[in-house]
Amino acid sequence: MSGRHTGELHSHTVEGTDPQLYVQVHEPQNDAGLRPVLLLHGFSSSSKLNWEDTGWLGALLEAGRRVITVDLPGHGRSGAPEDMDSYSPSRIRADLLQIVFDAGVRPLRDGDPSSGLDVIGYSLGSRLAWEFGATQHELVHRLVLGGPNVADPLADFDLIAAQRYLADGTPIADESTAGLLKMAMLLPSNNIFALLSLIEAIKTEPYDPAEAVPHMPMLLVAGEKDDRAASMPELAALGAKAGGMVEQLVLPGRNHTNAITSRAFKQGAISFLGV
Amino acid sequence: MAEISFPLPDLGEGLIEATVLEWLVSPGEQVERNQPLVEVETTKSAVELPSPQAGKVVRTYGGPGDKINVGEPLIVFEVPDNTAGIVGTVPKEEAPKRRVRLSAVLDED
């Protein structure tokens, strides 16, 4: 891996409590002089799994981009707070805002390509990026949203069935719930109860992309075999209606799990954010 | 010139195989160490494997959709003779000189 990085357990108090988020700022060897890129990973993943092992971090550093990675609460090397509020999307967005300011990100200024921030999200990370972009238009320059949802599979998650399954193995009837839990349990590093807290918190703030729409240019990306590819035009229409420029990229043969490593995805994102 | 073969590395606990998604290099190509070689998918995630070696690609194993077991050949490089021994073990014709005792030796104490 090229580039230096600094790692820290983020410990800036936001709204009175420490979010315990693990943040890394990765410096490129040859800085292209452009604004930093914030990477937001998906549910049950981590910055390492979603962005490092998949080659994203290396590709962005190679392109001269400064990269900020954050593990979501209960994921990767971040802490797993007890209180449900730490997992609410609005709280996470507030934490992200503090993190990027601490990393030196400054509001967009005309004619200064190093000002502002680009954001790349995947799946749940795309939901957070969509909302972050919609609320932080003075900060966010462009968005790349991979595997983006229009509906909210986490808000529809059957928590009671999941808890019953974890307690005594009672099979889960709902297919989406069973699939998400299976995915969460595949990785021994996951704190399953923290992930369920995240789902519980998301249920109190379900995703509604029409509620707040980002105005900045957006690139939407999904695998051809990901159901989300079919609903991308809906998101694109919302963005266009809000006055934003929206591009879409469908990756042939890829699904929601394996679209992430795609070279076409990385190259598409790097060139979209390279202006 | 010598050839060095690299097997599919251990990709984490319990994973015994991976499916090739896409090769990022092709035979005849000169690659640098750590350059992305191939995207593979396991039952847990998709990963991009960096090159463990600088050299010219001689052969790659498996196309998109093919499964490769951990430990089976993934890629073969051609490297100058004098560098081959540094990073990998190059199989030689001669018999190994070192002997390992496989029978149990009871502890004295």
Image (tube, coloured by chain):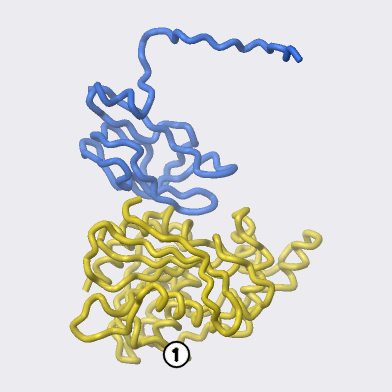
A220 or A81: which is nearer to us? A81
Q: Quadrant of the C terminus of chain B?
A: top right
Give above or below for A266 relative to A208.
Answer: above
Residue plotted at (42% across, 46% down): B65
Q: Colour of chain A?
A: yellow
> In the image, A25: left or right of A123?
left
Q: Position of residue A92 (x, y in %)?
A: 53, 78
Looking at this rendering, what residue extends furthest in the right direction?
A: A168
Circle 1 Cα neighbour tier, 10 Å, few/some/many (<14 / 14–19 / ≥20): some
Which chain is rendered blue in the image? Answer: B
The residue at the point 42 percent across, 88 percent down is A135
- What kind of residue is marked 1? Ala
- The quadrant where residue A119 appears: bottom left
Q: Where residue A252 sits in the image (x, y, percent)?
A: 35, 60
**Along the horizontal axis of the image, is A206 left or right of B31?**
right
| Chain ID at mark 1 | A
Task: Please indicate, yes or no, whether residue B22 appears anywhere in the rendered image.
Answer: yes
Residue A37, percent from left and from top: 34, 70
In this view of the protein, which residue sits in the foreground, A70 or A143? A70
Q: Nearer the viewer, residue B3 or A31?
A: A31
Query: Which quadrant would residue A242 be assigned to in this image?
Result: bottom left
Q: Is residue A48 above or below residue A175?
A: above
The residue located at (74%, 12%) in the rendering is B108
Residue B38 point in image, percent of width and height: 35, 46
Callout 1 secondary element: loop
Q: Residue at x 45, y 75 (%)?
A: A99
Q: Which residue is mark 1?
A: A212
